[in-house]
Image (cartoon, rainbow, N blue to C red):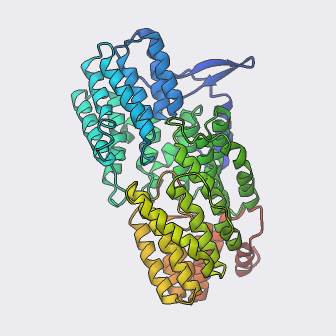
């Protein structure tokens, strides 16, 4: 098992040399006179296609398992160039146009391209009954997409893949894709995590049997990507990057687990490698997604200079962002826009730089919920900086964006509504209506606890329960503040502002043992800080100059 101290060395080793083993998806390409070894893990997908395309087909499926959709399509198209009768290759193209199962709403263009791939699959060659069942399962995601709700199509796909497994019980790939489909049906409000646990129960025994399969490691991480479950994914998280280091998303995906458990250095290391790999491969959205997770981790360790460096690397990557792309890496264009808005907002809010937050520019492009990020940060910065009247316009824009999303995306409408509630609560509190502000923020925290974060983000810009702790502490309710901070820490462990807030609340509440413990945690989180935040000075002073 690799831990933070050895992770970067291990990952650099596998990325640069990829070991001595010869695996099913290893291929060689000549670049500037040097041989580069591609390592994507081992996949064996039986087909009726020409034996000559077997390796290329398996490589394309391996790319699909690591959500490298653009290169997966290129791989399946290469198969079709050599065997035009290979209908199942169009299945792979269709799923690639569907993209990241956890990415939310799809563009009409992507859905139309997926539907066209399904039509070609149905009209090509003489696929086996098993291959036809795969094709028809994928069709459920696209057919009637203009009139059938996405949720209904996702559920129909899961049922179709369940039938594929029932008809082909020895088909490993069908079982894996079905487990992913089960996880895709999970609702963010289901705190029993029934779908996720069902998927994990299928995947984990198979991972022991097939430890080099990229989909197994990847989908286990996704299944456990929730606060109460995250620690269960640590083994898969620490192994996935070494299974498929040629896939930028495989280098990033472990950080979903590291973020959930507060293992910040591991998150930095794997996201830095993902960013570098994505930039080399020209996948701007994946690079920006990794940079958002990366800056979040740096800020929890009070490595503000390193965080600033991430911010400064954004512009050249952003210049390569293609808003019209229907395929790419695991991160769709909306993830790129999310990162572009979130990165500067995080840099201001996590450091308590309220004036900087209030002055953030509002993006002119993106989706309603990514544009909302800037309005939220500006409103929060203005109110917490003592200028609640200045927050009014941004709060109004949040309400408008929320309403705009109601008919487009219920999940993101709810997320923007929570941002509106938090911003409105702070404006009321800062204007002197303290009881109103506290009640409103407590309701916002309850709403946020009842849902879950999207995979597009490492975490909320300002966790509502933690923010409630800040407000209660300012109001003089130290006991209530400590309770709020501790509830937030249970959900979002390892956050610098959460630990420090809990320390201050415990100190104010006369709980010396808890204050000492949380100040120690603050110092432990910031032991490699590259800037001296006032919070660090206070923590050191409290526990005796450590």
Residue 542 in the image: above or below residue 85: below
Q: Quadrant of residue 302?
A: bottom right
Q: Position of residue 46 (x, y in %)?
A: 36, 19
Residue 490 appears in view: no
| Residue located 34% across and 14% down the image | 48
Residue 246 in the image: above or below residue 48: below
Q: Quadrant of residue 262?
A: bottom right
Q: Position of residue 508 (x, y in %)?
A: 60, 88
| Residue located 64% across and 76% down the image | 382
Question: Along the horizontal axis of the image, is 205 left or right of 132?
Answer: right
Of 276 and 238, nearer the camera is: 276
| Residue located 77% across and 77% down the image | 545
Question: Along the horizontal axis of the image, is 472 left or right of 279?
Answer: left
The quadrant of the picture occupied by the N terminus is top right
| Residue located 52% across and 71% down the image | 396
Q: Position of residue 237 (x, y in %)?
A: 52, 45
Q: Position of residue 282 (x, y in %)?
A: 64, 34
Question: Along the horizontal axis of the image, is 111 left or right of 351?
Answer: left
């Amino acid at each position: 098992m690799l831990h933070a101290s050895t992770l970067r060395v291990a990952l650099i080793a596998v990325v640069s040399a990829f070991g001595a083993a010869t695996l099913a998806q290893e291929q060689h390409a000549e670049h500037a006179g040097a041989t580069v070894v591609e390592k994507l893990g081992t996949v064996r997908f039986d087909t009726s296609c020409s034996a000559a395309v077997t390796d290329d087909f398996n490589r394309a499926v391996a790319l699909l398992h690591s959500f490298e959709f653009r290169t997966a399509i290129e791989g399946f198209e290469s198969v079709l160039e050599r065997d035009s009768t290979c209908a199942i290759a169009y299945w792979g193209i269709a799923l690639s146009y569907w993209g990241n199962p956890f990415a939310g709403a799809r563009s009409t263009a992507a859905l139309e391209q997926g539907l066209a791939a399904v039509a070609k699959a149905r009209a090509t060659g003489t696929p086996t009954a098993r291959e036809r069942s795969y094709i028809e399962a994928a069709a459920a995601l696209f057919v009637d997409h203009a009139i059938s709700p996405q949720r209904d199509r996702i559920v129909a796909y899961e049922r179709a893949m369940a039938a594929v497994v029932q008809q082909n019980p020895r088909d490993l790939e069908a079982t894996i894709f079905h487990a992913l489909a089960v996880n895709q049906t999970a609702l963010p409000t289901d705190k029993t995590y029934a779908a996720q646990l069902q998927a994990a129960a299928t995947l984990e025994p198979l991972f022991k049997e097939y430890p080099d399969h990229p989909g197994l490691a990847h989908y286990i991480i996704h299944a456990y990507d929730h606060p109460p479950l995250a620690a269960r994914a640590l083994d898969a998280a620490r192994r996935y990057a070494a299974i498929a280091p040629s896939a930028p998303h495989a280098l990033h995906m472990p950080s979903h687990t590291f973020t959930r458990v507060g293992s910040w250095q591991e998150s930095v290391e794997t996201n830095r490698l993902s960013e570098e790999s994505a930039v080399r491969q020209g996948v701007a959205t994946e690079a920006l997604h990794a940079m958002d997770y990366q800056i979040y981790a740096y800020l929890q360790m009070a490595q503000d200079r390193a965080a600033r460096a991430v911010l400064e690397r954004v512009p050249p990557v952003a210049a390569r962002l293609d808003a019209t792309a229907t395929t790419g890496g695991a991160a769709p264009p909306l993830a790129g826009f999310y990162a572009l808005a979130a990165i500067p907002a995080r840099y201001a809010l996590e450091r308590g730089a309220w004036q900087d937050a209030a002055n953030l520019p509002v993006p002119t492009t993106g989706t309603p919920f990514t544009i909302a990020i800037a309005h939220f940060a500006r409103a929060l910065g203005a109110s917490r900086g003592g200028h609640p009247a200045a927050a009014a316009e941004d709060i109004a824009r949040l309400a408008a964006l929320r309403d705009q999303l109601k008919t487009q995306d219920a999940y993101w409408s709810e997320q923007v509504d929570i941002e509106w509630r938090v911003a409105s609560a702070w404006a009321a509190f800062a204007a002197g209506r303290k009881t109103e502000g506290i009640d409103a923020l407590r309701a916002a925290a309850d709403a946020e606890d009842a849902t879950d974060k999207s995979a597009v983000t490492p975490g909320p810009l300002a966790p509502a329960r933690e923010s409630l702790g800040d407000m209660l502490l300012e109001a003089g309710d130290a006991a209530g503040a400590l309770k709020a901070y501790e509830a937030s820490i249970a959900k979002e462990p390892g956050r610098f502002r959460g630990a420090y807030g809990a320390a201050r609340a415990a100190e104010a509440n006369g709980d010396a043992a808890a204050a000492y413990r949380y100040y120690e945690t603050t110092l432990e989180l910031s032991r490699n800080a590259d800037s001296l935040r006032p919070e660090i000075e206070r923590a050191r002073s409290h526990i005796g100059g450590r």
